[in-house]
Amino acid sequence: MNDLLSGASQTYDASSIEVLEGLEPVRKRPGMYIGGTDERALHHMVAEILDNAMDEAVAGHANRIELELHADNSVTVRDNGRGIPVDPHPKFPGKSALEVILCTLHAGGKFSNKAYSTSGGLNGVGSSVVNALSDLMTVQVALNKELYEQSFSRGIPKGPIQKLGPIQNRRGTTVTFHPDPEIFGHQTLKPARLYKLARSKAYLFSGVEIRWKSAVADPDTPSEATFHYPAGLAQYLTETLSKITTYAERPFAGRVSFEEKYQIPGSVEWAINWTPAQDGFLHSYCNTVPTPEGGTHESGFWAATLKGIKAYGRG
C-alpha cells in the first residue's frame, strides 16, 4: 500500500490548492463544460452561440439568424436581435457588459426573468466557454445605430471595446470564432452537421428565418440555404414521415400559450402521428434545445396525451 502512495506528494496543505482565475478552468478541463474535445464537443461550440441567437428570436426580439462556416474553420453567427449590452457594467465600471459576459463564467442576462422569460442557454455560460476555447473570437454589436467591436483570444480581451461609428439598417449581435487547435487538434467543423443543426432550429421555432452559408465544399450539403417553417413541428414531422404510411393524413398538432391561459411566460407546441410502418420515436425539446433524456415536460405531456386518448375511446 505504501508503495502505491510513494509517488504522491508527501504533504497536503493549503499550498496544494490550485486557484484558477477567469476562464482558466475551462481550458484546463474542457470536458466539464462541453463534454470533451471530440467532434461532438467541437460542434457543440456552434450550438452554444446559435442557442443565444435563438433565445433572442423566441423572446420576440429577432426574426432572422445567419450561420456561416468559413474556409478557415471559423464560424459566424449573426442575429438581428437587441444586441449584447455594451455599456459599463455596474460591478465592473472599467469593463463593458460585453466583456464581462464573454470573460466571466457566471455572468449573463438569463439567470433571472428580467431580460428573458425563457431561454435555451445561459448567455454568460455558453458564450464564455466558447470564448475560452477559441484562439480568436470577435464580437460586433449594432446597437442604437452605432457599431461596436471587441476581440478576444483564449478568453482574454485583445483590447477594450471599440466604437466603430454610426451604422444604419442593422441591429443585433455578430459572433465569429475559431476553435483553438490547442484544444481540438486538427478536427474541423462539418458542413453537413451544421446544416442539419440550422435546419432543426428553424423547425423548432416558426417565427425565425435561418440563413445558412458555407465556404467549405461538401457534395451532400448546399453551400447556401434559407430555412423558414411557418408550420413548425407539424411540418417537421410531416417531412420526417413523408415516405412512411401514417394513420392520419395530418399530424395532431397545436400550440398553447401559457401567457394567454395562465398569465405566466412560456408555451408548449406538439405534433403527433401514428404509423404501422416502423417503431415509434420521440424527440423532445425545451426552449429549442434537445432533451434526449426526457424530463417532466416530456412525461407530463405523454401522461396527458394518454389520458385524453383513453377518455376519447371510452366516450
Image (tube, rainbow, N blue to C red):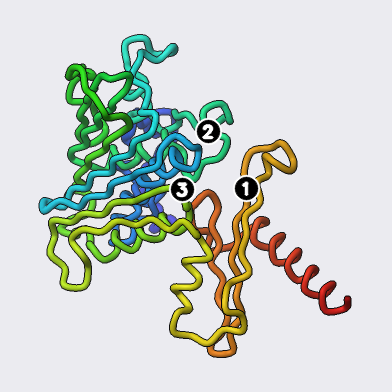
Q: On the image, which quarter does residue 99 sit in?
A: top left
Q: Is residue 288 above or below residue 89?
A: below
Tell me if residue 47 can be seen.
Answer: yes
Pointer 1 residue:
267
Q: Is residue 120 above or below residue 102?
A: below
Dot 3 or dot 2: first in sequence order is 2
User: What amino acid is labelled 1 in the image?
Assistant: Ser
Q: Do callouts 2 and 1 mark residues in contact (Cβ within 8 Å)?
A: no
Viewer-nearest residue: 297 or 305: 305
- Front: mark 2 or 1: 1
Locate the C terminus by quadrant: bottom right
Tally of numbered discs:
3
Say which element carries label 1.
strand
- Front: mark 3 or 2: 3
Residue 52 picture location, percent across and down: 40, 41
Say which element carries label 3.
loop
Q: Which mark is residue 207?
A: 3
Q: Residue at x 29, y 64 (%)?
A: 193
Dot 1 or dot 3: first in sequence order is 3
Q: Residue at x 36, y 46 (%)?
A: 50
User: What amino acid is labelled 2 in the image?
Assistant: Tyr
Pointer 2 residue:
116
Dot 2 or dot 1: first in sequence order is 2
Residue 85 picture location, percent across and down: 37, 22
Residue 280 picture location, percent across and down: 58, 80
Q: Is residue 101 above or below residue 193?
A: above
Residue 159 picture location, percent across and down: 18, 21
